[in-house]
Amino acid sequence: MKKGSLFIHGSICLGIFLIGFGPIIIAVTASAIASIAGCTLDEGSANPCLIFAVDVGETLYSMAMLGWITRATLPVAAALFVIYGIVTLVLRLMNRTG
């Protein structure tokens, strides 16, 4: 496998991974920020959270709610991984025989 090909395959796999797990990574980041800042973060409503005299409560709440989108993005990412694997396998087999 060539270096350029490995970079392309790695980039595609990373993109698919981020489609699936990106929302949960963002939600965990929001939870970590709220915890470090000593703020309350829950699913019921946005709570005030001052960081450097700026209220980021709404932003953290929105970030935390992205975790629920993972229920939709994980199956999509799984399907994309399978499709990508099949396409890659078929193309490699065609190049060997052709």
Image (spheres, rainbow, N blue to C red):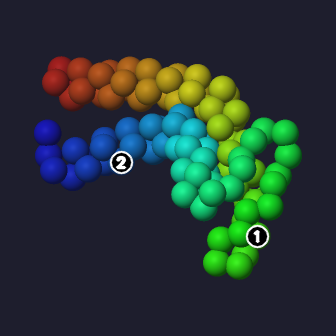
Q: Residue at x 72, y 76 (%)?
A: 54
Q: Is any part of residue 17 visible from this angle?
A: yes
57 in relation to 69, above or below: below
Where does label 1 land, which residue? 55
**Residue type at the position of mark 1:** Asp
Dot 2 and dot 1 residues touching (CB under 8 Å): no
For marks 2 and 1 on the same chain, the one whose residue lies earlier in the sequence: 2
Query: Of 79 and 39, which appears nearest the observer?
Result: 39
Where does the C terminus fall, quadrant-wise? top left
Q: Position of residue 84 (x, y in %)?
A: 41, 29
Query: Of 11 and 89, which appears nearest the observer?
Result: 11
Q: Residue furthest front?
A: 38
Q: Residues within 10 Å of mark 2 (few under 14, many from 20)?
A: few
Q: Position of residue 11 (x, y in %)?
A: 36, 48
4 in relation to 66, above or below: below
Where does label 2 land, which residue? 11
Q: Residue furthest bottom?
A: 53
Q: Residue at x 18, y 20 (%)?
A: 97
Q: Quadrant of residue 65?
A: top right
Q: Position of residue 77 (x, y in %)?
A: 52, 30
Q: CA distance from mark 2 to mark 1?
A: 36 Å
Total number of numbered labels?
2
Q: Position of residue 72 (x, y in %)?
A: 67, 28
The secondary element bearing badge 2 is classed as helix
